[in-house]
């Protein structure tokens, strides 16, 4: 198991979990509405499947936010 | 500029602030700020900037006031329903502070007019509710080297980032607009009215900090909050080396109008 931080909070994950898998276990319903930063660097969407997480990684999910009256 | 006695009284709580003083208040009175969108965010921003005495406030919005706006767009009142938002906003600003010169644009910000409109302003405020215009504001400000504040709200949450040339831009964080088909369902929209005030006043404070040069701006930091828990968090970021618009080899070199999908509540 690996200990990482997701949006500042400790989370224990299986070793070498990918970003795509992390999105699933965090119940992110719509991955295209999220931008992800790992250790201060943004990861392009195409690399979510191949980006593996390791001990002490810090992951930030940044959600698209508009204005509330329209989602897009 | 020489302040009148009334102005010294009106702005006394700014003038008393050691970091602002007469000099800072003069900078505010000489400031020119463009607010894009006279809605949930634009309303508190316009009111606080007007109260602060920002000399020129431009407001661009093509909509008229709708009854459903009044739950959060505090610059518009019940008798304003069906009135153009920019007119409703200008009337309130004039009543609040006659020192302010209000310039209204009753139209949408587009790829065609954006650079022409923003060129006359010191600072641009994103108070819009949709991603096509958020990306347009970002790209126009990066290209024109104008500082701006990004603001987004949804449900119980808000986020804001301040851009100045050289800092991370909105596209460094959010590469391109989400695909219209990513919108899950209308049931996920909606916003708690007070969230607009919470985020809008943070943006207004950023504008006043920029004009006066006081403090540290929210540059290279995305501030997010969730009102359900009242947790505030700043996420440190940095300019992305391959950012489509602000990097040394940009792929976005001219403005585009992205397609907009709409998720309105249907009236029965």
Image (cartoon, grey):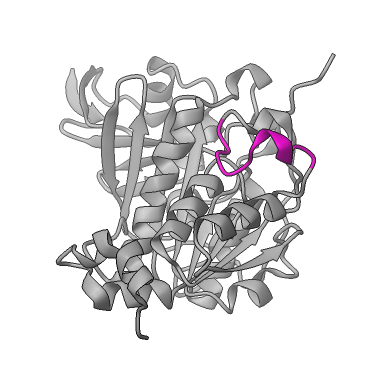
Task: Give left or right: position of B42 versus B53.
Answer: right
Taking B192 as reference, is B254 above or below it?
below
Q: Please tell me which residue is depicted at 65% across the width and 28% down the height of the picture.
A: B183
Image quarter (top left, top right, bottom left or bottom right) of the N terminus of chain B: bottom left
Taking B260 as reference, is B19 above or below it?
below
Main SS of residues in magenta: loop
How many marks on residues? 0
Image quarter (top left, top right, bottom left or bottom right) of the C terminus of chain B: top right
Taking A40 as reference, is A17 above or below it?
above
**Residue B253 seen from this side:** yes
Along the viewing direction, whichever of B3 and B117 lies nearer the viewer: B3
Along the viewing direction, whichever of B124 and B224 lies nearer the viewer: B124
Taking the view exactly as shown, the residue that stands out farthest to the front is B5
Could you say where residue A62 lies in the image, as x and y percent from the top left?
41, 38
Taking the view exactly as shown, the residue that stands out farthest to the right is B268
Could you say where residue B193 lies in the image, as x and y percent from the top left?
51, 28
Q: Please tell me which residue is depicted at 14% across the width and 66% down the height of the picture.
A: B18
Q: Is A6 part of what is drawn in magenta?
A: no
Q: Please tell me which residue is depicted at 71% across the width and 64% down the height of the picture.
A: B105
Task: Give left or right: position of B190 versus B268.
Answer: left
* Quarter-of-image position of residue A53: top left
Q: Give the range drawn in magenta.
A: B72-82
Could you say where residue B258 lies in the image, as x and y percent from the top left?
71, 52
* Quarter-of-image position of residue B60: bottom right
**Residue A35 seen from this side:** no
């Amino acid at each position: 198991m690996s200990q990482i931080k997701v949006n500042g909070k400790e989370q224990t994950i299986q070793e070498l979990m990918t970003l795509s898998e992390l999105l699933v276990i965090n119940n992110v319903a719509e991955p295209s509405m999220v931008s992800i930063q790992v250790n201060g660097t943004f990861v392009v969407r195409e690399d979510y499947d191949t980006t593996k997480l390791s001990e002490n990684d810090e992951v930030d999910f940044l959600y698209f936010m508009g204005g509330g009256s329209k989602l897009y | 500029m020489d302040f009148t006695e009334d102005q010294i009284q009106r702005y006394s709580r700014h003038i008393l602030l050691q970091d602002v003083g007469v000099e800072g208040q003069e900078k505010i009175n000489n400031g020119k700020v463009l607010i894009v969108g006279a809605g949930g965010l634009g309303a508190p921003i316009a009111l606080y900037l007007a109260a602060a005495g920002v000399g020129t406030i431009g407001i661009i919005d093509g909509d008229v006031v709708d009854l459903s706006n009044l739950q959060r767009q505090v610059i518009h009142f019940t008798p304003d329903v069906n009135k153009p938002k920019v007119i409703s906003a200008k009337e309130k600003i004039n009543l609040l502070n006659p020192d302010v010169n209000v310039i209204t644009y009753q139209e949408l910000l587009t790829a065609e007019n954006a650079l022409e409109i923003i060129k006359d302003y010191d600072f641009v405020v994103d108070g819009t509710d949709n991603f096509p215009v958020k990306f347009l504001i970002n790209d126009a400000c990066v290209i024109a080297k104008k500082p701006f504040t990004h603001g987004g709200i949804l449900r119980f949450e808000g986020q804001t980032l301040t851009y100045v040339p050289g800092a991370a831009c909105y596209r460094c964080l959010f590469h391109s607009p989400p695909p219209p088909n990513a919108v899950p369902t209308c049931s996920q929209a909606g916003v708690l009215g007070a969230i607009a005030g919470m985020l809008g006043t943070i943006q207004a404070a950023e504008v006043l900090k920029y004009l006066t040069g006081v403090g540290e701006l929210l540059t290279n930091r995305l501030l997010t909050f969730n009102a359900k828990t009242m947790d505030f968090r700043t996420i440190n970021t940095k300019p992305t080396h391959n950012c489509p618009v602000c990097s040394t080899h940009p792929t976005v070199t001219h403005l585009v109008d992205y397609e907009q999908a709409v998720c309105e509540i249907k009236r029965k």
